[in-house]
Amino acid sequence: MNKKKWRHIVSVYSMIYTAITLLSSVLYLCNGIYEDPSGNWHELDRAMILLIGIAAFELCTNLPVKPLILRYVTAYIPSLLLAFAYVWSTGLREPLAKTAYRDIWINFTSLFVLLSIINTAVCAYKKKRGDKKG
């Protein structure tokens, strides 16, 4: 992978992490909670889960699997299992919330689906644009 690709991955990771953290903070403030009750561990956990998701997305954009939906599923399933394993491992540090696995499934899946839709749209646009040029 070249330097430009790494820079792109780090930029996407940083932007998504910042957006998620800001959204979480705003939601806490709107609910009258002025400090993150989970503290610094929660920030590190968010960073790790996002890293798993970004790695999975990079994997699915580079897998030589056709059709595109199969490529997404091939990357999604093992990465979601890895996210579940990470959540389980955090349970060794502190008790998990009753909805921990449901929450990670909803958050991980929604971000993965959003990125997949964006990637599909970009691929379709590039293909359409390439057909017009040729």
Image (spheres, helix red, strand yellow):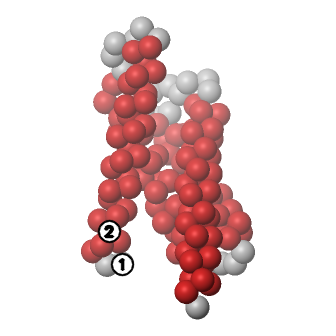
| Residue shown at 64% from the left, 34% from the top | 102
Q: Please state the horizontal and vertical placement of residue 125, each as a whole percent of the image.
A: 58, 70
Task: Assign a secondary structure to mark 2.
Answer: helix
Along the viewing direction, whichever of 39 and 73 lies nearer the viewer: 73
Residue 41 lies in quadrant: top left
Instruction: Please name the amino acid that badge 1 sits on.
Output: Met
Rendered image: mark on residue 1: 1
Task: Assign a secondary structure to mark 1.
Answer: loop
Q: Residues within 10 Å of mark 2 (few under 14, many from 20)?
A: few
Q: Please state the horizontal and vertical placement of residue 100, each as a whole percent of the image.
A: 58, 31
Instruction: Please name the amino acid that badge 2 sits on.
Output: Trp
Which image quadrant: the N terminus? bottom left
| Residue shown at 46% from the left, 37% from the top | 90
| Residue shown at 62% from the left, 84% from the top | 131
Q: CA distance from mark 2 to mark 1?
A: 7 Å
- The answer to whether residue 102 is left or right of residue 52 is right
Residue 7 lies in quadrant: bottom left
Look at mark 2 in the image and give the residue it sits on: 6
Does the image show residue 95? yes
State if disc 1 and disc 2 touch (CB < 8 Å). Answer: yes
Rendered image: mark on residue 34: none
Q: Please state the horizontal and vertical placement of residue 118, each as a whole percent of the image.
A: 56, 58
- The answer to whether residue 83 is left or right of residue 48 is right
Vertical relation: 19 (above or below) 48: above
Identify the mark nearer the N-term, 2 or 1.
1
Q: Please state the horizontal and vertical placement of residue 117, each as a whole percent of the image.
A: 62, 56
